[in-house]
Amino acid sequence: MEINITHGEQMVVSLNGRLDTVTSVDFTKRMQEEKVEEKLVIIDMTNLEYISSAGLRALLALKKTLALEGKELEVHNLSPICQEVFKVTGFKNILTVK
């Protein structure tokens, strides 16, 4: 999985590939290392082909960490496959999806 991060008014994290058991570890590590100064972090899933339960857990953990710092997390541009995963698991009600 490729992770591209841009900073500005909000931090945008663009994911390319799969967020699964293996890559969610890399995602979590990268997000822990990244200095987040913005109030809003957007996860752009335009090019995310697949997300597993491990990927969902990584997003939930990130949301909780950001909330402790008074920051917000939004998920944008879900592919049809990822939309279905979010719907079936109820994550559409847990995370802010746009």
Image: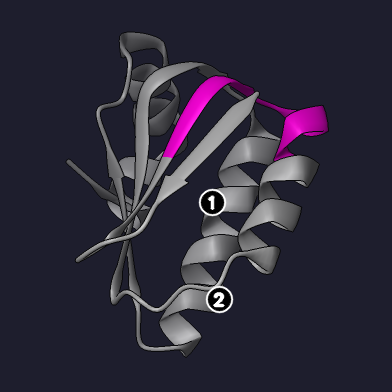
Quadrant of the rendering where the N terminus is positioned: top right
Q: Position of residue 54 (x, y in %)?
A: 70, 38
The magenta stretch spans which residues? 14-24
Viewer-nearest residue: 2 or 24: 2
Name which residue lies at 49% across and 88% down: 68
Place of residue 36 in the rendered image (x, y in percent of width and height, measured from the top left):
47, 73
Examine the structure image and report whether residue 77 is included in the region drawn in magenta.
no
In-image side of 48 versus 39 (left or right): right
Q: Amino acid under label 2?
A: Thr
Q: Which residue is mark 1?
A: 59
Query: Residue at 25% across / 28% down in the picture?
Result: 77
Crowd around label 2: few <14 · some 14–19 · many ≥20 (10 Å): some
Determine the residue positioned at 63% across, 38% down.
55
From the top left corner, tell me how far across and down residue 75 is, in percent: 32, 44
Most distant residue in the bottom direction: 69
Residue sitting nearer the eye, 90 or 77: 77
According to the picture, the residue beneath numbered tag 2 turns out to be 65
Helix, strand or loop under label 1: helix
Give the left or right position of residue 31, taking residue 97 as reference.
right
What is the secondary structure assignment of the residue under circle 2?
Answer: helix
Any magenta on residue 15?
Answer: yes
Q: Position of residue 23 (x, y in %)?
A: 74, 32
In this rendering, position of residue 47 left or right of residue 62: left
Query: Label 1 vs label 2: CA separation?
Result: 10 Å
